[in-house]
Every structure is written in C-alpha cells, then in structure tokens.
Amino acid sequence: MDRPFIAALAISKARGGLPTPGFFDCARRLGRFAGDPNGQDAWSFHAAELNAAFARWGGPRDNYNDDMMPNRPTVSFAEHTLC
C-alpha cells in the first residue's frame, strides 16, 4: 500500500478546508485520484488521506468536527474506505 500523503495536513482556508488544487493534481499524476478536485470526490479522498496520515504518523483520530469545518460535507465511514 502507498504511504498516505502527509500533504493532506495542509489545508486551504479559502477552499473551506480542502487542500489546494495542486494536492489533487499530484495525486492524479501518481494515479491515486481520478475525481473532481472541487467536488465530493475531493472531500472523500482528502478525508481518507488525512485519516491515513494520522493513523501512520500520529495525530487526532477524530480529525474533523463541526467547529473546525462547518461547511464540510458529511462523509460516511463507507466513503472513507472507498479511497
């Protein structure tokens, strides 16, 4: 399995908590992301990468909460595991 992108930790306030488009461009070039970098695919992929980064290198286990990211769409556990 590929290592998670540690760059998932760097998010853009201007994008509501998603990384910049370059994060998704890099993931696409590496064959790890094929979705819309501005849609639900991006949220699901980022959540999975962020959780994987925390699991590998340590950090919050419940990384998203409503106070941190009030505009973040809800992503189910099943969606996390699809990425």
Image: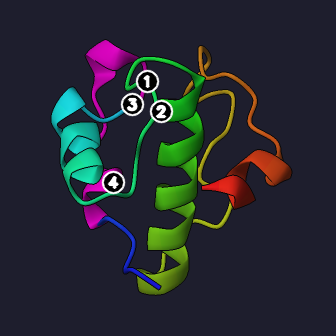
* Residue at the spot 16% in from the left edge and 36% down from the top edge: 22
Q: Are marks 1 and 4 in contact (CB under 8 Å)?
A: no
- Residue count near mark 3 (Cα–Cα under 10 Å), binned few <14, some 14–19, many ≥20: many
Residue at mark 3: 18
Give the spatial CA distance, label 4 vs label 3: 10 Å
- The disc placed on residue 42 is 2
Whether residue 77 appears in this view of the structure is: yes
What's the residue type where badge 3 is placed?
Leu
- Number of on-image labels: 4
> Residue 41 sits in which quadrant?
top right
Q: Amino acid at mark 2?
A: Ala
Specify the amino acid type for callout 1. Answer: Asp
> From mark 1 to mark 2, how far is it between C-alphas?
6 Å
Sequence-earlier tag: 1 or 4: 4
Residue 47 falls left or right of residue 30: right
The residue carrying mark 1 is: 36
Contact (Cβ within 8 Å) of mark 4 with mark 3: no
Gap between marks 3 and 1 measured at Cα: 12 Å
User: Residue 51, percent across and down?
Assistant: 56, 63
Which of discs 1 and 2 lies nearer the camera? The answer is: 1
